[in-house]
Amino acid sequence: MLTQAAEDYLKSIYKLQEKGGKVSTGVLAQYLNVKPASVTGMLKKLKTMNLVNHERYQGVTLTSAGKAIALEIIRHHRLLELYLFRALGVPWDSVHEEAEKLEHVISEDVEARMDEFLGYPTTDPHGAPIPDKNGVVTQKAYFQMTTLHKGQSCVVAEVSDTDPALLRHLASFNLYPGTAFRVLDIAPFEGPFTIEIATENEEGQQAILGREVTKHIFVADVQDTEPT
Amino acid sequence: MLTQAAEDYLKSIYKLQEKGGKVSTGVLAQYLNVKPASVTGMLKKLKTMNLVNHERYQGVTLTSAGKAIALEIIRHHRLLELYLFRALGVPWDSVHEEAEKLEHVISEDVEARMDEFLGYPTTDPHGAPIPDKNGVVTQKAYFQMTTLHKGQSCVVAEVSDTDPALLRHLASFNLYPGTAFRVLDIAPFEGPFTIEIATENEEGQQAILGREVTKHIFVADVQDTEPT
DNA sequence: GATATAATTTAGTCATGCCTAAATTAATTT
DNA sequence: AAATTAATTTAGGCATGACTAAATTATATC
């Protein structure tokens, strides 16, 4: 059985690897709120366990064994998030923090029961894919919101889950995974996006989202639409 | 915030204190599966935090601050046991082990939501009382089953929760907290109890329970009844 | 190609929380 | 009361996983 710290390292390496090949010691240190020297120490340990590939000064990658463990932890995390949200009504912006603690101690049996209760879901409350029991991730194609143009329509696919304030901000506009919206305007010079959110009643709610916010939103089903 | 080890020490001291005043280093060590020398070390640390009273060679007791923390952990544990049992169908004999890991990481918010879901229960699946949010324990009067005599009727109040095999044995007779039974016979020389368990249909199921088992069963509502 | 800067690793420390072995204190016999 | 036995504490070690400071390696600049 791995320590909690080792599991956190593997999970973090996996996530950082997704956004570009090898992971540097410094980036990993910053992500884990730890000093680079501490990272070097842990990587040595993980290497002896054949969970990572690490050449001095060259960055880290996961071995297939390391990746399997990372995906297991990520599955725990995302199933827990969804369970807390659906079964216990824990707010959207705090499920991440709760799951962060629980993911290391939940048993496979309890996890299987939550999975069944939830009907074998494939995405968590933030739209991130839940790996299956065998570590297979089914990821729908999506784009960063910053790539959208005026007049395009789309559906929110996923949002970053780490910043509770950001999540509360999105919730105030009903911008959840699955929410459809249309880009009304994009101000120049990295300016804000003005969007219209599809609502049940006739008139769509408008929202103005700063650039920093749009970097944390990922969308799918992008289509060009007629300007109103 | 306390470490998990410190929380386990406080919880254990509380439980051992219930069965007789001061707790000795050796007993605590055995209970925690740790060497006596390790206990001495931890007690020193807990003493500097004013969580225990400890005089060399004289045993430990909890301070009021230590007791408050112990009761908080016990509340977490018992609510978790009941939640796992009721909400997720985790078997009777494994909820203890699961809760043992979760009790240290569950948040007050999630706990409050489980409490609400369960309808503010007062006992866990083994019949142990759940302390309330303020650490108040309401304990119904009960007796060890070994004090029963032939012909007496009673209701199971509580059973030990630590041994899964014992719990499966009791479950095979439907002996849960709340189950009523009558003592048909007690064999001499510390022999087994033969009991008749009240069932919905006409004929009561009979069970033979060895002495070791009866030490782990606690009963209430004891009454003398006519022998059949 | 030499040098300045940035990133990474090594070396040595510290707190936890466990261990074993030896010393001490308490309790029990004789 | 002295001696044996049992319980407890002290002393010293070890693994984990963090830290700082110094040394090393890589990268960018001139």
Image: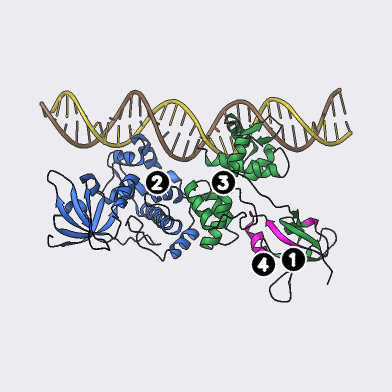
Chain colours: A green, B blue, C brown, D yellow
Labels 2 and 1 within one chain: no
Given this view, does label 1 or label 4 mark the residue nearer the observer? 1
Numbered label tally:
4
Residue under numbered circle 2: B8
Q: Which residues are magenta?
A: A146-171
Q: Look at mark 4 in the image and give the residue it sits on.
A: A174
Q: Which amino acid does the dot numbered 4 rest on?
A: Asn
Res B109 label: none
Q: Please give the residue where the numbered disc 3 appears in the rendered image.
A: A133
Looking at the image, residue D28 sits to the left or right of residue A24; the answer is right
Q: Are marks 3 and 4 in contact (CB under 8 Å)?
A: no
The three-letter amino acid code for the residue at tag 3 is Lys
The percent coordinates of residue A168 (x first, y second) are: 64, 63
Does residue A107 appear anywhere in the picture? no
- Judged by depth in the image, the label closer to the viewer, 3 or 1, is 3
Q: Is residue B5 magenta?
A: no
Q: CA distance from mark 3 to mark 4?
A: 31 Å
| Label 3 environment density (alpha carbons within 10 Å; few <14, some 14–19, many ≥20) | some
Q: Secondary structure at mark 4?
A: loop
> Which of the two discs, 1 and 4, labels the residue nearer the N terminus?
4
State the residue position of label 1: A181
Residue at 27%, 46% (x, y): give it. Answer: B22
Q: CA distance from mark 2 to mark 4?
A: 43 Å
Q: CA distance from mark 2 to mark 1?
A: 51 Å
- Given this view, does label 2 or label 1 mark the residue nearer the observer? 1
For the residue marked with disc 1, what is the amino acid?
Answer: Phe
Q: Is residue A72 visible?
A: yes
Give percent across and percent down for residue B142. 23, 58
Does label 3 or label 4 sit earlier along the sequence?
3
| The stretch drawn in magenta includes residue A166 | yes
Residue at mark 3: chain: A
